[in-house]
Amino acid sequence: MTAAAFSLARDSLQAHLPAQRFVRMRRHGYQRLLLLKSQINIHYFWEKKWFFIALLIGFIIINLPTPQGLTPEGQTVLAMSAVATILFITEPVPLPTVPLLIIVGEVVLLRLSPDRVAQSLMSDSVLFIMGSLMLAVAIVKQRLDRRIAWLLVQITGTNLYWISFGITMVCGALAAFVGEHTVAAMMLPVGATLITLTSTEPKKVRNVAAIILFSIAYGCSIAGIATPSGGARNAIIINYWQQFFFNPLVPESYRFLVDYVTWMVYAFPMFLLRLPIVTLLLIWTFRPETTDLSRAVARLRAQVEMQGPIKPSDWLTFALFGLTIAGWILYSGTVGLGTVAIGGALLFLVTGLVRWEDINSGVNWGVVLLYAAAVSLGVEMKDTGAAEWVANSMLSFLGSFGADRGVGLWAAVSLLTIAVSNTMTAGAAVAVFGPVVLNAAQMSNSDPLTIGFITAISSALGYLTAAAQPAFTIIYASGYLKQKDFFKIGWKMMFVSFFLLLFLAGFYWPLIADR
Amino acid sequence: MVSRLKRTTLSYRQERALEKTLQNIRAQRRNRFRVLACINEDEDSLITVRFAARLAPDNDCDIIILFVRPIDQGLWSGGLQVRLARQNMLEAGLDLPGVSHLKKALEVLKEEGVDTTGWTHETAHEDAWGDPAGDNKVVYTSPDDRTVVLKLKTAPEVTNGILDQYELGPYNLMILGESSSWRGDKKSWFSKGVVERVTMLSPCSVLVARDSLDKKGFLICTDGTSRSMQAVRRAAVLAHTVGEPITLFSVAPTTAARSAADENVENAKALLKALGIAVANSRTALGAPAKRIIELGSDYKVIVVTDEGRSWWQRMWRGSVAYDVVRGARTSVLDVR
């Protein structure tokens, strides 16, 4: 054979056929073959190891001698909470599996009636979660991002620092009412457009990209605690206050019926104070390659002009959006946050601004199930006395450091919640730990309102990873940021926020406590 | 009634026709040298595309560039499916991260002399794993029937996505970038390291590309076995076609085996001479095979090793010289299968 006669396909590296065995499995692809193999060999158990470890830990906890002060039912609930927490953090199985386990556990292990368990799954806070997710999809689908962006740059100009501040402010103002994930998903194309219009090579404007995208993310994230409708965790804490502390026969307990405006009075300053801090920290952390975005702004204007004048459907969106917010402010105390949220989604469907198919595919219904079961478990923690026992143990432990009351307790609760929220979804963390910390507050003669606010706000202070906040996950999906970028700015933001929260709790909230 | 419930199958004639169609497609592909280059978000991974262009230079070579995107997980985004945010970006006319990387890969191909300007192209989309973004591909076909394919694939896991893609081939060569952290044989079986698992599981030859494009030559290693000689022949044809000088190398684990190593190299030289392929140099060494290969190979563009024909379990428990070289080398390594 001469060298000139070589054919790479024939004479060089060969393309072997896939394995001939398991012909039927091969039709479904290599992946299903591996799945089958993993189900009949040890590799399956290794991949799912945390699921089995969690179940084993739960089994051990249930079978330990019941500690003094804890009921057997409380011990079972603690075991279920431990299993749920491990599964939330390690995710060996799809997350919606965890609420299903909780439901089955409550019926089988706690021997609660199925009807009671089913009833505990649905409350106003769960309705609110469902409604706000549907609203989120409806609003995102209206594609108002560019108009909002154009309005923004008309106010702030073309300087990157002012644009960053403007984005943070606008995202925050919106996210305070409709939730951070909505606004992040809506504003992400704006951020990406500004970046691509600044330079076609993302590598050359990495820091500009980071500033713009983190302005969106932090704007959404710091505002998520500003109003009850800003996040599911807020609605869950409001629900717990009402369930655990409100007694219609005791006038002093009416303060635990926290309405929309009361929440805003407590928490909105936390958002306002951090607004300028976000921009300053971003500029300090990511030195931008350029601060002049005039080219990008000019192109954005051209794109908005090409969209034509604002449409009647856009005005209708604003109107419905405003109606929903008005409903939350004026009527959430009587009809509940959830009913208003569902009502808002209903209006969007009836007016044809969004289709049910869009809502169905855009909402992850597993999250609704997750929160429902977590709240149900939290209520059982309270009813079985498990929350009280854990709170007692926690206070004894903290007492040895002098942190079982006052500022020490606040700091301990805040740090615990921040640590947990960096590893699992914040709403579930609040749902599971809420009863414990609220009981701890009661036992240490601290104000449960203060502790509840600290828990809810601290659950939004996990800033270290892309998975720590919903808005972070969404902007990470753009592909412009790396994991280490989140840590670079996150630890600073966490540090500042923590001390700001303690400052508000110590000096501002006492002034408005008797309101 | 029973006959209506009976499971129906294709008739014998239909079955034969289907098999013939599949055979024809495979036969057509067998006349092509098909290279699958895998990229990710890292710009350094584009080195696989450069290697693909240089190792598949002729018109009977096809290049497929693959970006595997894991399926979006919606729960961490607070219940709003991340896919909604992605859809929002698509509707805004912005590219998904994978698409922009594939476009960049096309520019790299152009820099390497494979210019798809003026070629016919067609796009295809299919839903995958319930994700509306699904699988997308663009097929560029030259007037000489050479194809360049850009494939954006969705899969629950990147490794399985790459191996799934092999089912749609097959391919002569798979090129991957270097792993950020190599694990041992046993750990890699449990870990999720993409490059390690694909290297272990791939049915075809795998090139693990490192930054060695400015070096020269193929260092082809042999241990004298017939499998190794086959690999020497195939790798030498590839090196000869792309114009790279060839150095043959064999390692003797002990002094007593030195003469066997010399003989291995001479046999390989003779084999290549019979094919009309010139050998620039031949070397032997004494010591641990993987260590010596890595040491000498660092000056070459590609080290060529071959799998000893061991099964999964054998590789895991007894180790593998080829895998050790793939893992430890400071230059690109081609594991011939």
Image (spheres, rainbow, N blue to C red):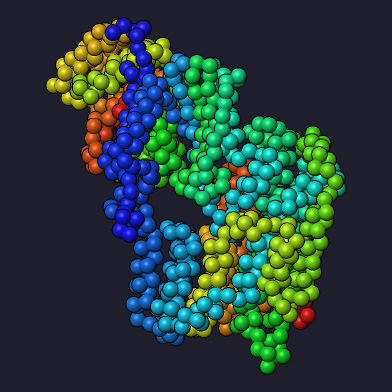
Nearer to the camera, A288 or A58: A58
Which residue is pictured at 51% across the width and 50% down the height?
B130
Nearer to the camera, A217 or B67: B67
Which residue is pictured at 36% across the width and 24% down the height?
B27
Which quadrant is the C terminus of chain A positioned in?
A: bottom right
Tell whether B315 sits left or right of A54. left
Q: For residue A289, say whether it is visible.
A: no
Q: Quadrant of residue A512?
A: bottom right
Nearer to the camera, A346 or A34: A346
Q: For residue B17, say whether it is visible.
A: yes
Residue A56 x, y percent position in the rendering: 35, 68
Residue B58 x, y percent position in the rendering: 45, 15
Which residue is pictured at 53% across the width and 66% down the height?
A370
Q: Quadrant of residue A375?
A: bottom right
Which quadrant is the N terminus of chain A positioned in?
A: top left
Total numbered circles: 0
Residue at the outermost bottom position: A249
Residue A409 x, y percent position in the rendering: 60, 73
Tell whether B166 sits left or right of A182. left
Which residue is pictured at 68% across the width and 86% down the height?
A253
Residue B294 x, y percent position in the rendering: 33, 26
B203 vs A452: above or below = above
